[in-house]
Amino acid sequence: MASHSTLYRDDLAFIHVDGYGFHWAGAADAILDWLRQFKLESGRVVDLGCGGGQWLARLEEEGYETCGIDVSEHMIQIAKQNSPRSEFLCGSFADIAIPECDAVTSLGEPMNYLNSGPAMRRTMRNVYSALRSGGVFVFDVRHPASRKLSSQVHKTTENWFCHALIEEDHEKNQLKRYITTFRQTKDETYRRDEETHRLKVFSRSDVVGWLRKIGFRVRTRRSYGSYKLGERQSVFICRKP
């Protein structure tokens, strides 16, 4: 995973939370239902790649203790405002010590930012060690394309503009997002910034195999309840015996 200073700096962190950070809202009801099905109606939940902390705030409303982990210091600052009662840790969740907990979530592809199979497996082992018996790990992952892909997306508001060139190398199972932002400043000029995000995409079979080898019982879904994911994305619902 890239260093703290290179991912989701000040402007992109703000823009992501303001205009893109709603994946958690579509997933929330389904995850809460799954936790209840596993008799986890209380306890501590750790969110990996917590972003702006809105999901943590929802968990708090439902009575859970919460901890958020994110590689971006700027995201953590926003999350502290949205979920002031949560504990926060800044760093790569492949390397950081995950606190003992009853459930772990990771919503919106943070696991793809790990950039390698070994880092993914190390994170899975860290999660398994942190979970109490009967604990649950819920996350989603983007899968490889069958050919080389390139696309562009953009979004504009009164206060900011964000453009992303997305390139995917199907032979290396890598995806890159070249992101350019313009954000309005206090003197009404616009500040430009650029970030490059490098992701690793993983096959469903590889992810399931790694999880089971570690000891998880695994189910997969193509959606969080009624909230459907993209064509090449899956949800993994994992339980520690």
Image (tube, grey):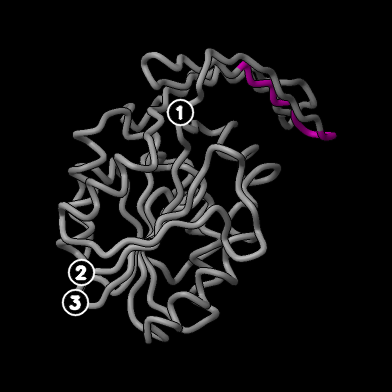
Residue linked to disc 2: 100
- The numbered mark, 3 or 1, whose residue comes first in the sequence reads 3
Residue linked to disc 1: 144
- The numbered mark, 1 or 2, whose residue comes first in the sequence reads 2
Mark 1–mark 2 CB contact (< 8 Å): no
Vertical order, 25 against 203 (above or below): below
- Residue 136 figure quarter: bottom left
Residue linked to disc 3: 133
What is the x, y in percent for residue 97? 18, 54
**SS of the residue under disc 2:** loop
For badge 3, the amino acid type reads Ser
Q: In this view, does 234 lie to the left or right of 125?
A: right
Mark 3–mark 2 CB contact (< 8 Å): no
Instruction: Classify 10 Å Cα crowding around label 1: few (below 14), some (14-19), many (20 and above).
Output: many
154 or 174: nearer the eye? 174
216 or 15: nearer the eye? 216
Vertical order, 199 against 241 (above or below): above
Does the segment drawn in magenta span residue 164? yes
Mark seen at residue 110? none
For badge 1, the amino acid type reads Pro
